[in-house]
């Protein structure tokens, strides 16, 4: 494998991304800063980045431009922290697949991803991203998931947690199928040795048990609908469908605030992936979904499988648009109540997944959070400040001393959340990627012939 002197992989036949060579110092001049420390905009600022960190912020008239610095004109633009995709899937470890995936994420301002279905090879990939050897975001990874097929009893569950911790994974991923004893053993062991566990809530345990056992994050609001069923409910004959959406008409919505309060008290965070559920069950036609601009980066075979998934959902036993509409409304109420109660929310869309193109889908998730009742600032916090708090990372706000993972926008996202996708450029670990460079990278992955 060939490398440049600075350690970045060569473009060309190998197909690997290269981080362009940039000046040691970059200055955003005369920019509007959205620090995310409060719902404010600091106007006419200059932001100096050196060796991957923000070293100075001040009024444009008081901050000199260091000699030899790369200057980025921030006039009428808005500088904010990079976003996180807290429910990503790193599909395979083939070089071309990785390059495509990270390009889609970073071109959309996603500078941190949390891989929710890990494999051993991801440990090395995480380090190669971190060192800059391979172009890629900050990567938080689980090990292979613990589920009903991969775990054979409580002792095995505990053993696998210990092994994953020893291997160096960032957290343990839980998938469906664990029985109550296996889940409890997993949770106790993870809590004892200090590795977070996250994912789906086993049906055998339920949300309240997951909260008692200090689950780090619950994905997709999994288990919340089941927890809101009245004791007298038959639970749709035992069949809830995709994340229990078919149970919507039977739920006791008056219990949502209490369940949200219990979530906050437990310290468990949620990654709602609201856009995943909404676009799969709402009335949006597959024709309209296929026409989305980002679908140009999706192969014909993947797109066909996504269409089939949407069509299968609409033909599920007991599914109807009225129930789906109510399910969306109730999920939005849960999201809003979690926020109001102080329970942590983290930005994630589940990508790549059905009609969720990596990077692009995170901006659709932001729109979904605002539709649920969050302000644009509150929605943006779930992908910036909240992520830094959850991961205990030195990112998430624009301030001196922070890591320089940044997005430069052409319009203010605090006024309209859809402006989050009006990206003029992205800074990743202090390296500036202009819109022109991002578009050039993206152009390599436009699907021209459906293959």
Image: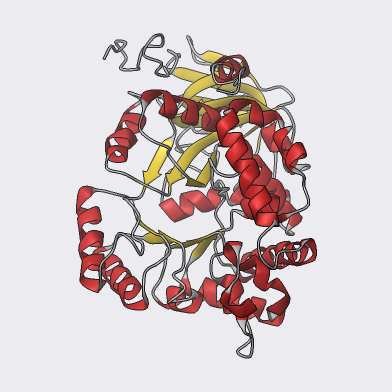
Task: Answer with the quarter of the image where residue 131 lies.
Answer: top left
Residue placed at 26% from the left, 61% from the top?
A: 161
Q: Is residue 70 above or below residue 348?
A: above
Residue 119 higher or lower than 386, as above or below: above
Quadrant of the image containing the C terminus? top right
Determine whether, in the image, residue 313 is placed left or right of residue 320: left
Residue drawn at point x = 45 percent, y = 36 percent: 403
203 left or right of 420 in image: left
Residue 318 lies left or right of residue 176; in this view the side is right
From where the camera sits, is residue 330 visible? Answer: yes
Q: Position of residue 386 (x, y in %)?
A: 53, 53
The quadrant holding residue 295 is top right
- Across and down, in percent, residue 247 comes to 66, 73
Q: Is residue 260 visible?
A: no
Q: Residue furthest bottom?
A: 232
Numbered label tally: 0
């Amino acid at each position: 494998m060939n490398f440049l002197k600075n350690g970045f992989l060569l473009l060309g036949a190998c197909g690997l991304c290269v981080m362009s060579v940039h000046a040691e110092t970059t200055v955003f001049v005369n920019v509007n800063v959205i620090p995310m420390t409060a719902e404010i905009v600091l106007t006419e600022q200059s932001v100096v980045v050196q060796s991957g960190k923000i070293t100075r912020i001040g009024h444009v008239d008081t901050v000199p431009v260091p000699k030899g610095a790369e200057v980025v004109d921030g006039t009428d633009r808005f500088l904010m922290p990079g976003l996180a995709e807290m429910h990503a899937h790193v599909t395979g470890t083939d070089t071309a697949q990785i390059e495509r995936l990270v390009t889609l994420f970073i071109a959309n301002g996603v500078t941190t991803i949390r891989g929710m279905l890990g494999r051993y090879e991801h440990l090395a990939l995480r380090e190669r991203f971190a060192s800059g050897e391979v172009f890629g975001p900050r990567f938080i990874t689980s090990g292979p998931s613990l589920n009903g097929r991969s775990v054979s009893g409580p002792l095995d569950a505990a053993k696998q947690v210990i092994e994953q911790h020893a291997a160096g994974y960032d957290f343990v991923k839980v998938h469906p199928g664990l029985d109550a004893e296996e889940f409890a053993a997993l949770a106790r062991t993870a809590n004892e040795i200090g590795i977070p566990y996250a994912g789906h809530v086993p049906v055998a345990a339920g949300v309240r048990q997951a909260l008692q056992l200090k689950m780090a994050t619950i994905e997709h609001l999994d288990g919340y609908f089941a927890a809101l069923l009245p004791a007298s409910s038959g639970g749709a004959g035992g069949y809830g469908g995709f994340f229990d959406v078919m149970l919507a008409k039977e739920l006791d919505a008056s219990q949502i605030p209490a369940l949200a309060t219990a979530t906050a008290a437990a310290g468990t965070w949620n990654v709602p992936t609201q856009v995943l559920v909404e676009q799969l069950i709402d009335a949006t036609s597959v024709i309209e979904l296929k026409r989305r601009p980002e679908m140009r980066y999706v192969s014909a075979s993947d797109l066909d499988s996504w269409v089939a998934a949407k069509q299968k959902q609409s033909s599920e036993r007991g599914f109807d648009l009225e129930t789906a509409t109510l399910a969306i409304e109730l999920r939005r109420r849960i999201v809003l109540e979690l926020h109001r109660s102080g329970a942590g929310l983290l930005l994630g869309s589940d990508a790549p997944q059905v009609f969720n193109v990596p990077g692009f889908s995170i901006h659709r998730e932001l729109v979904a959070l605002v539709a649920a009742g969050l302000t644009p600032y509150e929605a943006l916090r779930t992908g910036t400040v909240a992520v830094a708090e959850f991961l205990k990372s030195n990112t998430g706000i624009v301030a001196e001393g922070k890591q320089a993972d940044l997005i430069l926008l052409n319009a203010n996202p605090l006024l309209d959340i859809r402006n989050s996708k009006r990206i003029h450029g992205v800074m990743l670990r202090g390296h500036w990627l202009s819109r022109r460079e991002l578009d050039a990278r993206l152009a390599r992955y436009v699907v021209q012939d459906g293959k």
